Image (cartoon, coloured by chain):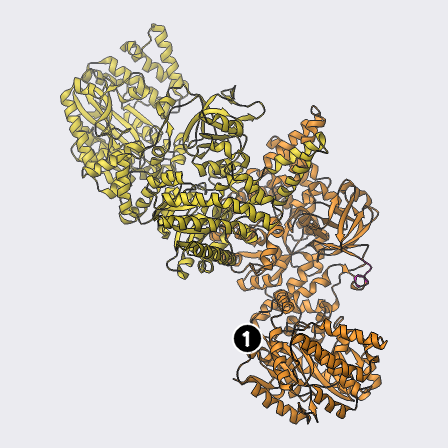
Chain colours: A orange, B yellow
Amino acid sequence: MKRVYLFEEGSADMRDLLGGKGANLAEMTNIGLPVPPGFTITTDVCRGYMKRQRLPDGLMQEVREKMQIVEGRVGKKFGDPHNPLLVSVRSGAKFSMPGMMDTILNLGLNDATAEGMIRLTNNPRFVYDAYRRFVMMFSDVVMDIPKRYFEARFEALKEHLGVKQDTEVPADALQALAREFKQIVRDFGKEFPEDPYQQLEMAIEAVFRSWNNERAMIYREREKIPHDLGTACNVQAMVFGNMGEDSGTGVAFTRDPATGARELYGEFLPNAQGEDVVAGVRTPLPLSALHERMPEVYAQFLEIADRLERHYRDMMDLEFTVERGRLWMLQCRVGKRTGKAAVKIAVEMAQEGLIGRDEALLRVQPSQLDQLLHPHFDENALASGEYLLLAQGLGASPGAASGRAVFDSKRAMELGKTEPVILVRPETNPDDVGGMLASKGILTARGGNTSHAAVVARGFGIPCVAGCEAISVDEHENLFTVTVDGQTIAVREGDFISIDGSTGKVYRGAVPTVAPELTEDLHTLLQWADGFRRLRVRANADNPHDAAKALEFGAEGIGLARTEHMFFGEERLPIMQEMILAKSEKERRDALSRLLPFQRGDFFAIFEVMRGLPVTIRLIDPPLHEFLPRYEDLLREVAQLEITAPDSETLAEKRRLLQRVEELHEANPMLGLRGVRLSLLYPEIVEMQVAAILEAAAEAQRRGYEPHVEIMIPLVGHVNELKLAREYLERVAKEVMEREGVRVDYKFGTMIEIPRAALTADEIAQYAQFFSFGTNDLTQTTFGYSRDDAEGKFLAYYVEHKILPENPFVTLDRDGVGKLIRMAFDLGRAVRPDLKVGICGEHGGDPDSIAFCHEVGLDYVSCSPFRVPIARLAAAQATLRKRVQVAVDK
Amino acid sequence: MKRVYLFEEGSADMRDLLGGKGANLAEMTNIGLPVPPGFTITTDVCRGYMKRQRLPDGLMQEVREKMQIVEGRVGKKFGDPHNPLLVSVRSGAKFSMPGMMDTILNLGLNDATAEGMIRLTNNPRFVYDAYRRFVMMFSDVVMDIPKRYFEARFEALKEHLGVKQDTEVPADALQALAREFKQIVRDFGKEFPEDPYQQLEMAIEAVFRSWNNERAMIYREREKIPHDLGTACNVQAMVFGNMGEDSGTGVAFTRDPATGARELYGEFLPNAQGEDVVAGVRTPLPLSALHERMPEVYAQFLEIADRLERHYRDMMDLEFTVERGRLWMLQCRVGKRTGKAAVKIAVEMAQEGLIGRDEALLRVQPSQLDQLLHPHFDENALASGEYLLLAQGLGASPGAASGRAVFDSKRAMELGKTEPVILVRPETNPDDVGGMLASKGILTARGGNTSHAAVVARGFGIPCVAGCEAISVDEHENLFTVTVDGQTIAVREGDFISIDGSTGKVYRGAVPTVAPELTEDLHTLLQWADGFRRLRVRANADNPHDAAKALEFGAEGIGLARTEHMFFGEERLPIMQEMILAKSEKERRDALSRLLPFQRGDFFAIFEVMRGLPVTIRLIDPPLHEFLPRYEDLLREVAQLEITAPDSETLAEKRRLLQRVEELHEANPMLGLRGVRLSLLYPEIVEMQVAAILEAAAEAQRRGYEPHVEIMIPLVGHVNELKLAREYLERVAKEVMEREGVRVDYKFGTMIEIPRAALTADEIAQYAQFFSFGTNDLTQTTFGYSRDDAEGKFLAYYVEHKILPENPFVTLDRDGVGKLIRMAFDLGRAVRPDLKVGICGEHGGDPDSIAFCHEVGLDYVSCSPFRVPIARLAAAQATLRKRVQVAVDK
């Protein structure tokens, strides 16, 4: 098998074998661009090297043969003191891993070839500078002698000379330095190789070894790049951008990578090598500098950039060097870009006819849209360093917000009327809901992604950082403290803080935010997406505000309206608590009858917004104790009152409340009395809800809003639960319709969120007109994880240690949960071919999970309003991936 | 279709159509026994009647035709005043429902036939007594006029006559009474039918109607008899046992139904009808009375009983009447019997050659063995009325026990040294374990079948009644109170109480107990069972005592040894707590190294008992907080100390403890950090356990005990969990073996108790040498039920209202959980054909669930030692049911 490819022997589609860099160098060479000649040693060789820890026999012979061809092309000879060829040796893997692996420049230099170079260039300073750099780089990378020893020697030299800049060191001093550097190597008991081919062999091995250095491993973990790909090794004739004012080096993007604007965007540094740019020693100039200095070279570069973009049909990231007025291309690859640029470039390239609409859709990662769809912090403001990063918790409800810290819900409600506030709590409970609603953001020290704070915040679209364990909240003193770089910082009531509910970051001060926008380009792209996708996209929305937002973002209905959030309002919670504490069904019904008008109003407002579109309303799901004060708080209060006021009426009252809370207390509330179980034991609650829904729908119908109501019963595990609940709810629905004298389009269906429901979906489908997979709970029960506990206690460890490939609450677990979903889908459709099936867990907004839903054949996904555009795009991609095999650059 | 069968037209195998009574009357008739002639109207007619609410056209014509044949046989005529035939009309369903449906005797009497009867019998008092009884019975049953009106009139009559006994009322008064009874009927606006055929038609309808009376419905619910079977209706010529001293009536069993002894057992009442026995007016004599009075009749009866037993090949329950020295058989059916009798009869009948061993095995209900295998209360003592039933809770750990009530664990440990004690607690926690071990029984007011008390009690084989909510425990006053029949009773420390952990009943006083015995007969039966069954039977046992018990009961290994119970011992818990509170891995390892010798000793003791048999040891499973004081208790203490001793060291210490408990606190501990998750985060704990196991096994091996160790990793949900845990545990195992220099037979396997494990069992089987289904947790996660919460809050409601057919924690849910088990079994075996598969949840001791395990093809079931015999029998029956179709009388 061929192990070494000349650039002209390769092509862009040989990335697996030649790595990205090698493949693109080959491609550029073959389309006739000016590329310094060279060759690539394949990733196969690297893989073999990793196994056997040595290069294969005969490899260096092949290298010599290719080197001879390169020598012929450039008219120099590797190791020839009279006319020496210098080369760079660079890694280059299939997927770009910038800065992770090793590079050696100016390889081939030794005392003899250095002299030759001086004769050729007539520039001893340039040559000795290159020489001392090469010795240091080689010693560091190949011979494992830390760079700092060489740097220290250089510093000492400069001090001795009384100069500050490297450039002020004269040629002879540099020559002496190169010699001293070699002495350092000797001090380590090693000998610096003089033979260029020995240098080359050692460098090749070092490049292969660097595939498994620690930072490369970590990078691959993070980017999910397989560890067994290996890197290729590129050996290329050196060109020099630092040979005078007619030389230089630069990088450029064929379009603006930040905005996507169609204009060449880049930087140029005259009389410099690429490493100078990286080292940040000198500040690069805008690309116009090249235009001004060398208009012809610039024109040539423009043409090449244009040609490469047309050739690759994508925005390209280019590296080039000008050596004595001659342009050389050193690298080209598909350019990284912001979400905004990705959208603009994809849309405009399709409009220009460069790519098809289908390809345009595949060019944007759905996750890239996330940053466009929530208020986010101004990147420039953050970069200014003005705002101290205080801590990082869980990004529990996305969006960025700033405001004055308050530590008490009542205070939040007061201050929130006039000022933006961020509510900071150890954790929240139902008593805090008023304060939460009055706040721009919520920060808690404890609790996971399904903690009360997180759930309520997402429900109301309020940014939230939860479980930020680094902060210590002192409720009595109205402050929190946090240790940053060893310093304890206190944030007091009224101090400004800023939270990012996407990243979980908490800043001191009021970071300016940027509002989300559905740009013209994104709008266009999503319209194209709608033309391709088969999956419908709905939104999870519990109020008319979210519903309107969802519509604006293109939702085709509401897939989940949680009714329990509606009970948390300031006027409602007391009635709800009265209902729960009622001693008889009559008292309970009485309280419920006062809740009914609220619910009816809620539903009507949603129907009004969602005219003509389906609205799925889930009946009450959580256990009743969620509406009461926290058990632990009450226990504390009672314990203390027993000492301070043993005979007081307050104690007696608190004891009664505690008793009821104790009765409702559960060892594992997630698996307790909730959902349909609650509805069967206390039918009056859901009877009220269904009456409110149908009354609201009737009124909406009369006004011509065409409501399509889907009433959803949660937590069904056995067909009889659904059968029975549906029986008495149908009765209520019919009664209301008769009373109202209006026919309303309504359906009854169920969540599939318990393994047993999935396993017996054929039975359940007999009584369900639709299924909606509640993949949050289904993941909890299928894995046997309590999300609240797992995320804090072991899930991070599991993902970090690869015990689980992903957090299954973020990306749907295909092998386990997914198997149940497929099974339930097949069983349900077998019994009821027109069964409508969707998903309303948080996975409904995750692109990988959406692809899975498409594969299974679901009718729709439902996600939070802000993720609707992401879902539209992901749904289109799911269709396209199945239809066309387009290579998408990661 | 034929709707009416003469007795001679039917047979015993026509139970579906003729009901049990009709079929057996037919059978007796056909084998030539003296049965009063008659006929049976089929269950088909009843089913039609239930649908159409009327008898089918032409039925009464058929009845008349059959009646004419009966008239011919007895030489009397129905409704003929000169020679009247009287009949009984009785229900008789496929399955016996004693006393649930209606019966009418002496039908055919009216003023004219009564006169005829007097002429025939020359006994007016007998006739008028029968007449007044008939009118009352018919009015009550057929015409819906409550019996009490008639009884009141009779009482008034007796008062008027100044007599006490019915028998003292003279004939003419009875004649008048019959007339008055008819007047009562008229007062209700109805007319008593004089026409015998009209009487008959109405009676037949009433019998059919009675199939759906309330008490019959309730009975069928309880006995799981389908509601759509319907009853047959038997019309039979009357014979009279009350025609003088040469007459009488009796019942008999062909063997003793209590002990199974092979001797006729029964009662005889001279000069009486069957109803007199039922009414309890007169006390029946032993059967020997018949022998003394009518030796020839007795001899004939003996012969008939013997013949019937041989004919039916089972112990029979017989009813007979002697009319003027002539024996008539009125009923025969397979006799009900106690568990003890069932075993003895089955074994002896097989030994007599009457039935095969396979049939003998099918004759005993596995559940009947339960009463034989635990200490139970002396029935006679309970029946004496001496012991007041105080309350009933959940039977949480079977067995009966008496002792002095104590309310404090420390006190239990003191007093328990010299006296039997019953520990009474609101609920228990780890601090109570010492006291629990010192007690004969445990009674708690709160908590379900998986509460701490229940789990620990079952683990240690201590009888326990849990969740006995009727009692109010006052820990401070050392007493509990309970209200019985409106009276409040207090039980104080030192008072004797008795608890039955099977039924959940709590008695005042020390009820004598009867020790369990593996009788000779049972031993024989189980040996036969062993010859038939394919499933192996193991026991769940955590200590050598239970292991020995299990062996005694025939266990073939230990299927589940829970290691965490071993940490609760008095000397061990403090070290365990030290380990949990440790601040570093080093401190943790230090504490663990002190626990290791205890564990090694535990394991060695078990291997010593179980020589040569497999022992499955499950590594630590529960969350760590189970070993610490209760969160709520600590919270209370701290809250109060904050007021009483704000600056004390005690408060500071309790606060530290509280903080650690809070850190370990979980929203849903059942789904939290436990099982393999704990083992991956703190490998040192299970490393210690595996070292202890292997060291113990090495020592056992050296002593020639041939240990076969199966190390079981709990709560695996993803193959990587098992893979990783096994990797480092194998390492420990190999190290120990090398150090010990002994080869030990050990395997690594996993529980399948999480749905995801079942769904991905093919992956998991690659790293598991055995599977054991943990059906308790698998049921919890598949249903999404927390057992602790469900049993107290909604499961009883669900079972009662038929939302679930059974409590899925008692009988395995075939449709849901069972589907997962089948799937996991098939997936696992496909990958690893020699995969050993068992079940160790509580279902392992439930006969229906065992049958399911057999069907799926598992290798073994494992259950508590006391259920091993039940499992042996159930496993044999599972094989036999598949092999032979034997009609088994329910």
- Answer whether residue B725 is magenta in the image: no
Q: Position of residue B832 (x, y in %)?
A: 40, 60
Q: Position of residue A825 (x, y in %)?
A: 51, 57
Q: Nearer the viewer, residue B513 or B420?
A: B420
Q: Nearer the viewer, residue B692 or B132?
A: B692
Which residues, given as a range, are shown in magenta? A381-387
Quarter of the image with the C terminus of chain A is bottom right
Q: Secondary structure at mark 1?
A: loop
Give the farthest residue toward the top: B162
Which quarter of the picture shows residue A312?
A: bottom right
Q: Is residue B31 above or below residue A529?
A: above
Instruction: Judge left or right: residue A120 versus residue A751.
Output: right
Local crowd size for mark 1, using a 10 Å CA cut-off: few (<14), some (14–19), many (≥20): few
Q: Position of residue B197 (x, y in %)?
A: 28, 28
Give the farthest residue toward the right: A162
Q: How many marks?
A: 1
Q: Is residue A110 above or below residue A253?
A: below
Instruction: Judge left or right: residue A206 versus residue B306.
Output: right
Which quarter of the picture shows residue A300?
A: bottom right
Q: Nearer the viewer, residue B803 or A9?
A: A9
Residue carrying label 1: A53
Q: Amino acid at mark 1?
A: Gln
Q: Is residue B501 visible?
A: yes
**Chain letter belonging to callout 1:** A
Which quarter of the picture shows residue A375?
A: bottom right
Q: Is residue A763 visible?
A: no
- Answer whether residue A384 is magenta in the image: yes
Q: Nearer the viewer, residue B65 or A416?
A: A416
Q: Position of residue B622 (x, y in %)?
A: 52, 45
